[in-house]
Amino acid sequence: NEFAELYATLSPEEYAALMSQADASLVVTLSSKLSGSYNAACVGRDLALEKAPEKKIHVFDSESASAGETRIALLLRDMIDGGIGFEEIVEKATAFIANMKTHFVLEDLGNLVKNGRISRTAGFVGTMLNLRPIMGENGHGEIIPLEKVRGTANAMRRLVELVAEETDHLPAASKLLVLSHCNCQERAMQLKKAFLERCAVFKDVIVVPTGGLSTVYANDGGIVIAF
C-alpha cells in the first residue's frame, strides 16, 4: 500500500524513468476521479514507449484508493508469481477492478470537502449531526454515499453488516478483504475480527496503514475497505 501510493505525485518524466528500468511494468494508481496520478502515469508510459516501443507497460486506474490499490497489487503479485503472461494479467486485473467494491467511513470529512470530492453542505450536516456516512464508489471511481449512520461505533458496526449483506450469496472463503486505516490500528483490528466472524466469504482480512494522498483524504480515524 505504501509503495503503491509513494509515487502518487510523480511527474510524467519520473514515471517514464521508472518504467524504462524494466522490460514490463504494471502501474496501479489512485482513482483518476480523485487524483491526477493516473493521467501522469499514462503520459509517462507514452514517453517511455517513444524511446523503447518494445516495452510492455500498462497503467491501471484503480477506481479506488488505499485498500483498493493494495488489493489490486496483491492480485498482480499472485498472477506474476503464478507465471501468467502480461496480456492475460492485464485482462484479468481489468475485469477484477470492474467488479471490486470499495467502502469507507471517515470521522472527518473536511479534506474531502476542501478538495471538492463531496459537497460542503454534506460535510457540514455530517459534522453538526454527528453523522458518519458510509461511502462507496459508483463503479467508476467517483465517491457516492451509501448510508448515513449516527456515531462512529454505529457506522463501523453497520459497515460490517452491509458487507455481510452484499456477500452472503458468494462461496465461503472465496475473497480477500483489504482494510486500510489512518492512525487507528485498534479499530482496524476490531473490524478485522468482525468481518471474519460475520462474513464467511472472506478467507482473510489484510490490515495496512493508509499512505500518501489517501492519508490526507481519510484523516485520523478513517477506514477504507476493498474486496
Image (spheres, rainbow, N blue to C red):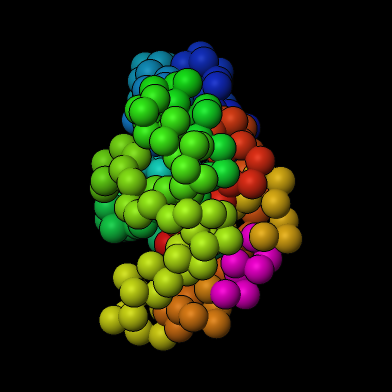
Query: In the figure, 174 relative to 154: above or below?
Result: below
Observer-nearest of 84 and 213:
213
Main secondary structure type of the part rendered in magenta: helix
Residue 109 shows in this picture: yes
Query: In the figure, 140 relative to 103: above or below?
Result: above
Query: In the figure, 186 relative to 117: above or below?
Result: below
Question: Quarter holding the C terminus?
Answer: bottom left
Query: In the figure, 211 relative to 185: above or below?
Result: above
- Number of numbered discs present? 0
Residue farthest toward the front in the current orientation of the protein: 129
| Residue at 42% over, 72% down | 161
Please check the rendered image and state whether residue 36 is part of the magenta-colored stretch, yes or no. Answer: no
Return the x and y of residue 180 as percentages of the image width and height.
59, 52
123 lies left or right of 204: left
Residue 204 shows in this picture: no
Which image quarter: residue 3? top right
Observer-nearest of 146 and 121:
121
156 lies left or right of 117: right
| Residue at 58% over, 61% down | 153
Return the x and y of residue 95 as percentages of the image width and height.
27, 55
Observer-nearest of 167 and 155:
155
| Residue at 62% over, 50% down | 181
| Residue at 36% over, 28% down | 121
Q: Which residues are magenta?
A: 188-194
Return the x and y of residue 136 as percentages of the image width and height.
36, 49
Return the x and y of residue 14 as percentages of the image width and height.
55, 18
